[in-house]
Image: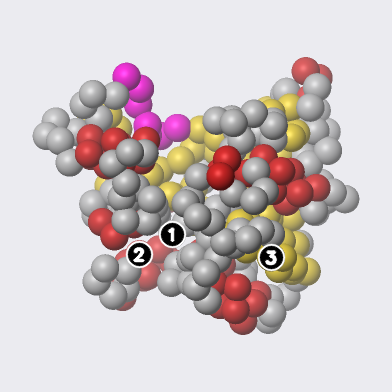
């Protein structure tokens, strides 16, 4: 069984040493990176990190710089890029999609997914969206009609069975190609930690934008009455706690 990780990034030069470093001893067979129009030094940072990895890697410049970071305003729609990324994993048994601001809690699931029968085409992965302190994630927020955390995404899938739909607003939500490909399982002993909300400088669209959904969410984060939970110690990776302890203020 073989596994390919796909990741896109945009202006993440300060975060890439952390999020790319997690793959060094992960047991994957391939890492395909896509620079989605960065204007900082992200491309060179990524290249210098992955060039010494002991498995197959690739680094592609995917699109021109963004005027604003909205998927439907980019030169290449997000669904088009994500499907190109997914297609780069053809020939591998499993594809794992990880964003540039995400860290996988642990890689203990690798032998488990390789034992799955062909009828299992996807794995739903729990998400922890970190806010405030390193061990805190939001459960409920006033004014919102749904709970954000933990939520579950299909991020481990067989690349020949799943595809991103060409519909605005659904670009990042992968779908089965046929109804017969829908059988999936839920990962319970690992997950993905999302760092986007951890630092004030990165809230909303990199500095916040009150006209966006992320801006509204961040306003809700600051309201009283939020209920917090704690990421279990067993799921908090050392690479993340070490980074948090040593990072510079303001990221």
Disc 1 to disc 2, how far (Cα)?
7 Å
Question: Do the CB atoms of the residues marked 1 and 2 lie less than 8 Å apart?
Answer: yes
Q: Dot 1, crowdedness within 10 Å: few (<14), some or many (≥20)?
A: some
Magenta segment: does it hold 251?
Answer: no
Q: Which residues are magenta?
A: 145-151
Q: Nearer the viewer, mark 1 or mark 3?
A: 3
**Distance CA(mark 2)–CA(mark 3):** 31 Å
**Left or right: where does residue 117 sit relative to residue 33?**
right
Look at the picture and state if 102 lies above or below 152: below
The residue sitting at 80% across, 53% down in the picture is: 88
Q: Which residue is mark 1?
A: 237
Q: Give the colouring mode of the picture.
A: secondary structure
Kindly report which numbered mark, 2 or 3, lies closer to the viewer in this rendering.
3
Disc 2 residue crowd, few under 14, some 14–19, many 20+, Cα 10 Å: few
Residue 50 visible here:
yes
Image coords of residue 233 (percent x, y): 35, 51
Q: Residues within 10 Å of mark 3 (few under 14, many from 20)?
A: some
The residue labelled by disc 3 is 61
In the image, is residue 221 above or below residue 250?
above
User: Is 87 located above or below residue 15 in the figure?
Assistant: above
The image's mark for residue 241 is 2
The residue shown at (48%, 66%) is 12
Label 1 residue SS: loop
């Amino acid at each position: 069984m073989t596994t390919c990780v796909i990741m896109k990034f945009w202006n993440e030069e300060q975060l890439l040493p952390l999020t790319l470093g997690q793959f060094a001893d992960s047991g994957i067979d391939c890492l395909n990176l896509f620079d989605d129009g960065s204007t900082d030094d992200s491309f060179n940072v990524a290249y210098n990190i992955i060039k010494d990895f002991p498995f197959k890697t690739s680094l592609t410049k995917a699109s021109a710089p963004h005027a604003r970071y909205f998927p439907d305003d980019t030169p290449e729609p997000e669904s088009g890029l994500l499907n190109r990324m997914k297609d780069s994993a053809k020939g591998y048994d499993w594809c794992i999609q990880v964003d540039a601001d995400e860290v996988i809690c642990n890689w203990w699931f690798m032998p488990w997914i390789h034992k799955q029968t062909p009828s299992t085409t996807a794995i739903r992965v729990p998400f922890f969206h970190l806010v405030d302190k390193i061990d805190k994630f939001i459960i409920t927020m006033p004014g919102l009609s749904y709970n954000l955390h933990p939520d579950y995404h299909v991020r481990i899938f067989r690349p020949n069975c799943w595809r991103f739909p060409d519909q605005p607003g659904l670009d990042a939500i992968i779908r089965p190609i046929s109804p017969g490909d829908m059988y999936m399982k839920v990962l319970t002993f690992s997950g993905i930690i999302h760092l986007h909300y951890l630092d004030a400088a990165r809230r909303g669209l990199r500095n916040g934008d009150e006209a966006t959904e992320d801006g509204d969410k961040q306003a809700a984060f600051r309201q009283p009455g939020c209920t917090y939970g704690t990421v279990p110690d067993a799921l908090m990776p050392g690479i993340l706690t070490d980074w948090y302890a040593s990072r510079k203020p303001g990221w």
